[in-house]
Image (cartoon, grey):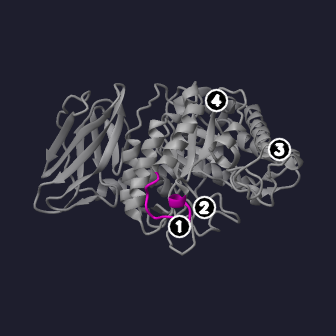
């Protein structure tokens, strides 16, 4: 247990946390969604029925989210189930559970990540989308969001709400005119409740799911959006189904048409018309076919990037294989804080490096919002959580610095505006260089190569001179000071053998 902080320090820590991304609030939803790619799901944790660890996962820690950020992810979706913690006719949520959700949200914000929370699994059919059940579902959903909204109304724009997860009628994933109409009604009720809680919720980005979060034509035909300037369509896409979900299905990835059709539909119907879409879940289940999953991941994320749809991979920390079992979608081993398939993460980052969309506005809370939060009765809880997060991050940073052997210097880069531009730095036998492979004027993405030309293995560290402000870097821990980008291995790739090269690192920057 941590000793409570003094009230003034509480105030300052909370204000710093809420304003960590800057002071300018987003004016359009694209100013947020354009900065969310790629994303990661904290699956089977806070959404577990019966408790956070009831589905076999360890309790979520700051170090887990630190590892996600260091890998290059920009968004963390935190699915949350509330039913086990709600009591009475008012569905009053336990203050202990609300504080735990807030603590995990702060883990992500401490890393300057976007974070999504939602109403995820529901029990006993209370959210069934029928006319007969509509009033009761609307009452409970609204009461949940009134409490969640009130708790988080002082948080900045990096916190995003998602009204529901895959809402549907029982096990029907196809839908009818009736179920579509009820989904539209529930989305509108939840949004209205969120806006009414005030604070930054008056302009917070809210994601509204389609029926079952699916995106086939007949489901989109029955989907309508409320009139609101700060909303995004929420969909999921485990496609092609025979490869990504079905068991045995196929273990070979060949059906690119299913992915192309998905992103073409949502881009044409929404993105091209000024309405952002977030792909809240995608993945492929493990079938002892890593090479095919790597191909699928890169193709999928590139298709999402082309359509201007940020995609968030599902990770449930499940690694076992069992005939007839789907959803074996573990990526980050949450016990060892290591990536089980680093090549798969690299393929996601390669796909995300083709993202050409950028926003000129930062998405952070305004000073007024932070002041409101700091003066609320919840300030102590959030500040305490941020203090723990800061301590954990500082400890992690110190370990990284002490474990890295030193070879670092900077050299001038070649013209950064050229798509063929390269920059290199060398010292002590370790050489780092980068090549710009995607340049859209106001920003660019580049691949980095690190080579150890010495006669001995090293725990490497390097730096480069770069143009602009780096927004993300994958497969390395990094920091930027002026034009100097300093970086080091991220656990699994921190040691470089004599004469070996490492080519799985990259970064994106804005000018």
Q: Residue at x 35, y 34 (%)?
A: 509
Label 2 element class = loop
Q: Position of residue 410 (x, y in %)?
A: 19, 39
- Asked whether the residues under the numbered discs 1 and 3 touch, taking CB atoms below 8 Å apart as contact, a structural biologist would say no
Distance between the alpha carbons at the discs numbered 2 and 3 = 25 Å
Residue 250 painted magenta: yes
For disc 2, the marked residue is 44
**What residue sits 34% from the left and 25% below the top?**
441
- Counting from the top left corner in percent of width and height, residue 474 is at 36, 48
For residue 138, the mark is 3
- The answer to which of marks 4 and 2 sits earlier in the sequence is 2
**Marker disc for residue 318:** 1
- How far apart marks 4 and 3 lie (CA) works out to 21 Å
Residue 152 visible at all: no
**Residue at coordinates 53% horizontally, 67% vertically from top-left?**
318
As displayed, is residue 436 above or below residue 111? above
Kindly check if marks 1 and 2 are in contact, taking CB atoms under 8 A apart as contact: yes
Give whichever of discs 1 and 4 has the lower sequence position.
4
């Amino acid at each position: 247990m941590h000793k409570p902080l003094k009230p003034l320090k509480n105030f300052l820590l909370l204000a710093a946390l809420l304003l960590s991304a800057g002071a300018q609030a987003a004016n359009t939803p694209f100013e947020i969604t354009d900065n969310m790619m790629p994303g990661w799901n904290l699956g089977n944790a806070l959404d577990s029925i019966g408790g956070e660890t009831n589905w076999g996962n360890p309790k979520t820690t700051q170090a887990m989210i630190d590892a996600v950020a260091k890998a290059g992810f920009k968004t963390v979706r935190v699915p949350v189930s509330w039913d086990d913690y709600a009591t009475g006719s008012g569905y009053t949520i336990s203050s202990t559970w609300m504080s735990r959700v807030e603590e995990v949200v702060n883990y992500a914000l401490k890393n300057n990540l976007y974070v999504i929370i939602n109403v995820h699994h529901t029990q006993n059919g209370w959210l069934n989308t029928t006319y007969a059940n509509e009033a009761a579902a609307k009452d409970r959903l609204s009461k949940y969001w009134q409490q969640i909204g009130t708790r988080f109304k002082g948080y900045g724009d990096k916190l995003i709400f998602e009204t529901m997860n895959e809402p549907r009628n029982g096990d029907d994933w196809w839908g009818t005119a009736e179920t579509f109409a009820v989904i539209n009604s529930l989305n509108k009720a939840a949004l209205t409740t969120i806006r009414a809680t005030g604070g930054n919720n008056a302009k917070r980005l809210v994601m509204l799911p389609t029926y079952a979060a699916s995106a086939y034509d007949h489901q989109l035909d029955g989907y309508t959006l409320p009139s609101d300037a700060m909303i995004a369509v929420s969909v999921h896409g485990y496609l092609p189904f025979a490869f990504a979900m079905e068991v045995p299905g196929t273990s070979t990835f060949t059906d690119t048409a299913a992915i192309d059709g998905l992103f073409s539909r949502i881009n044409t119907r929404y993105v091209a018309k000024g309405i952002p879409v977030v792909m809240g879940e995608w993945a492929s289940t493990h079938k002892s076919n890593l090479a095919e999953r790597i191909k699928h991941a890169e193709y999928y994320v590139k298709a999402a990037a082309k359509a201007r749809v940020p995609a968030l991979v599902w990770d449930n920390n499940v690694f076992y294989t069992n005939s007839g079992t789907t959803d074996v979608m573990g990526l980050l081993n949450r016990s060892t804080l290591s990536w089980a398939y680093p090549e798969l993460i690299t393929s996601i980052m390669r796909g995300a490096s083709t993202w050409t969309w950028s926003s000129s506005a930062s998405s952070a809370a305004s000073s007024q919002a932070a002041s409101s939060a700091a003066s609320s009765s919840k300030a102590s809880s959030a500040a305490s959580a941020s203090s723990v997060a800061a301590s954990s991050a500082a400890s992690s940073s110190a370990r990284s610095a002490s474990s890295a052997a030193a070879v670092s210097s900077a050299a001038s880069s070649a013209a950064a505006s050229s798509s063929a531009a390269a920059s290199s730095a060398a010292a002590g036998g370790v050489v780092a260089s980068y090549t710009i492979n995607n340049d859209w004027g106001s920003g660019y993405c580049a691949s980095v190569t690190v080579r150890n030309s010495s006669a001995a293995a090293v725990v490497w560290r390097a730096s480069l001179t770069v143009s602009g402000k780096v927004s993300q870097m994958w497969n390395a821990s990094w920091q930027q000071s002026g034009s100097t980008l300093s970086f080091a291995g991220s656990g699994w790739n921190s040691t470089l053998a004599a004469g070996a090269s490492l080519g799985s690192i990259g970064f994106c920057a804005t000018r």
